[in-house]
Amino acid sequence: MKRLGILILVAVITFAIVFFIQRPEVLEQVWLWLIGLAGVIVEGFRRITRIGGGGKEEKTGITPEAPVHRTPNPEINDLIEDRFDGVTMTVLRYSDDGTTTVGLLYVNGHYYCYTLEDTHQDEKVKGKTRIPAGKYNVDFLRHETGLTLDYRDRFDWFDFHLEIQNVPNFTGIYIHSGGDHRHTKGCLLVSDSLNMSAESTFLTNSRNTFERLYTYLKGELNKGRKVRLVIRDEKWFAKLNA
């Protein structure tokens, strides 16, 4: 029976390798989902191991309403962690198809969700250009604009927009929910679910993800903690595989 199981496993792995060699575009579409799934599995195993061994639960700084998952790749951890007395959100941009930029969001070194932005432009095109890579402060834009009041009417948990501040040549850059690049206007969209195909890239659970992230960051900002956003362009992935 054990030998049969091994043979079945080898057959499945062989089939997967042949399939992805023949259909590389499929691998490109699902690899981000696989990273997130791997993070969930590894984190769950680590928690079971700690509980089974009588160890204490690790402090992550994230509330139960905002679950996160430790990335299983230590090289990625090296990319996103440094000394900072506050909340660090890190976006690792993965792909840019000329219309949409897709990335992975980490909070304090833990995988959180996907991100979606506009494409890169050598010269800024208003409402169609992602912000440059770099380190930025994130805080509430404490102005009651028409858009702020609209969000308050729609969401009882919303106070002010989360603004990505001090971006060169950009103003009014927010973190919020949306479906695809048409909803970004230079901003950063977040979601647990991402659908990538040759025709389009869009988010499918953005509102719930944004509410969870917003609620967490709102609590931290109201405590007086600093929040920053670190963005790295696609070249981090090339370095990881060099």
Image (cartoon, rainbow, N blue to C red):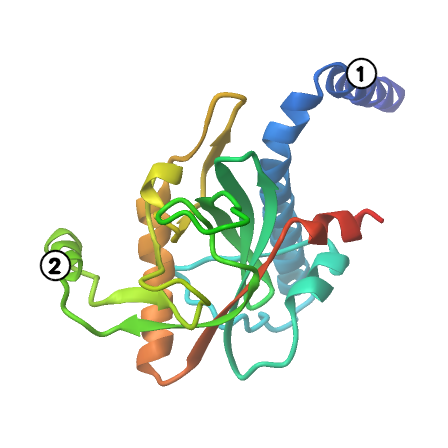
Asked if 79 appears above or below 112 in the picture, the reply is below
Query: In the rendering, which numbered label is found on residue 18?
Result: 1
**Residue found 39% across the figure and 62% down from its top:** 170
Q: Position of residue 109 (x, y in %)?
A: 60, 65
**Residue found 44% across the figure and 67% down from its top:** 167
Asked if 106 appears above or below 135 in the picture, the reply is above
Disc 2 element: helix
Closer to the chain start, of discs 2 and 1, is: 1
Amino acid bearing label 2: Gly
**Residue found 18% across the figure and 72% down from its top:** 143
Q: Position of residue 144 (x, y in %)?
A: 14, 68
| Real-space CA distance between mark 2 and mark 1, rounded to the nearest whole angstrom | 54 Å
Q: In the depicted view, which residue is nearer to us: 199 or 209?
A: 199
Q: Dot 2, how many residues are within 10 Å of its Cα: few (below 14), some (14-19), or many (20+)?
A: few
Disc 1 element: helix
Left or right: 230, with 78 as reference point: left
Q: In the depicted view, which residue is nearer to us: 196 or 77?
A: 196
Q: In the depicted view, which residue is nearer to us: 106 or 228?
A: 228
**Residue found 14% across the figure and 59% down from its top:** 152
Residue holding disc 2: 146
Amino acid bearing label 1: Val
Q: Quadrant of residue 151?
A: bottom left
Asked if 208 appears above or below 10 in the picture, the reply is below
| Quadrant position of the N terminus in the picture | top right
Query: In the rendering, which numbered label is found on residue 51?
Result: none
